[in-house]
């Protein structure tokens, strides 16, 4: 008995094309999510509005918001420090005994997590 499967070369070409396209689509989706997450992070980043003084500089925290593309995704970060080297970003995000927490990074990270779960599977449809 002989079985002839015609059109296999066409199917293999389609699979090969899909295999190349999916990483490109996924990368584009990740770049979009990263840009959206950075926008959310920056819109939530509190800005000190008082006069410049030691360890308090208007806009220092927001200026340090950063999006870095890495293989397979992106990284949101903020490395703002006070004049004395204290990690100001952590103090704002988590709070201190003198000030309430004002999370700005966590909401952006949660958005990115949910967006990835929703958008990436659609790229495979």
Image (cartoon, rainbow, N blue to C red):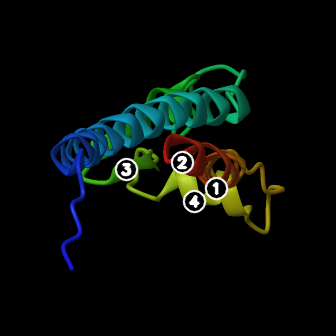
Real-space CA distance between mark 1 and mark 2, rounded to the nearest whole angstrom: 6 Å
Q: Position of residue 55 (x, y in %)?
A: 52, 41
Q: Is residue 49 above or below residue 116?
A: above
Asked if residue 107 lies left or right of residue 36, the reply is right
Marks 1/2 in contact by CB < 8 Å: the verdict is yes
N-terminal of the pair, mark 4 or mark 1, is 4
Which residue is pictured at 21% across the width and 80% down the height? 1
Marks 3/4 in contact by CB < 8 Å: the verdict is no
Label 3 SS = strand
Q: Is residue 114 above or below residue 69?
A: below
- Residue beneath label 4, please? 90
Label 4 SS = helix
N-terminal of the pair, mark 2 or mark 3, is 3
Between circles 2 and 4, the one closer to the viewer is 2
Q: Residue furthest right?
A: 100
Residue 117 numbered tag? 1
* Residue 38 falls in image quadrant: top right
Real-space CA distance between mark 1 and mark 3, rounded to the nearest whole angstrom: 13 Å
Asked if residue 60 lies left or right of residue 100, the reply is left
N-terminal of the pair, mark 3 or mark 4, is 3
Between circles 3 and 4, the one closer to the viewer is 3
Label 2 Cα crowd, 10 Å radius (few <14 / some 14-19 / many 20+): some
Label 3 Cα crowd, 10 Å radius (few <14 / some 14-19 / many 20+): some
Between circles 1 and 3, the one closer to the viewer is 1
Choose between 79 and 86: the one closer to the eye. 79
Real-space CA distance between mark 3 and mark 4, rounded to the nearest whole angstrom: 23 Å
- Residue beneath label 3, please? 73
Real-space CA distance between mark 2 and mark 3, rounded to the nearest whole angstrom: 11 Å
N-terminal of the pair, mark 2 or mark 4, is 4
């Amino acid at each position: 008995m002989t079985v002839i499967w015609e059109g296999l070369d066409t199917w293999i070409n389609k699979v090969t094309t899909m295999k190349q396209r999916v990483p490109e689509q996924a990368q584009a989706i990740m770049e979009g999510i990263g840009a959206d997450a950075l926008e959310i992070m920056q819109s939530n980043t509190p800005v000190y509005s008082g006069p410049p003084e030691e360890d308090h500089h208007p806009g220092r925290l927001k200026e340090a918001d950063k999006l870095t593309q890495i293989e397979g995704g992106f990284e949101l970060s903020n490395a703002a420090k006070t004049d004395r080297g204290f990690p100001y970003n952590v103090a704002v995000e988590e709070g201190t005994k003198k000030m309430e927490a004002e999370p700005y990074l966590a909401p952006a990270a949660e958005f990115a997590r949910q967006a990835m779960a929703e958008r990436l599977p659609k790229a495979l449809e």
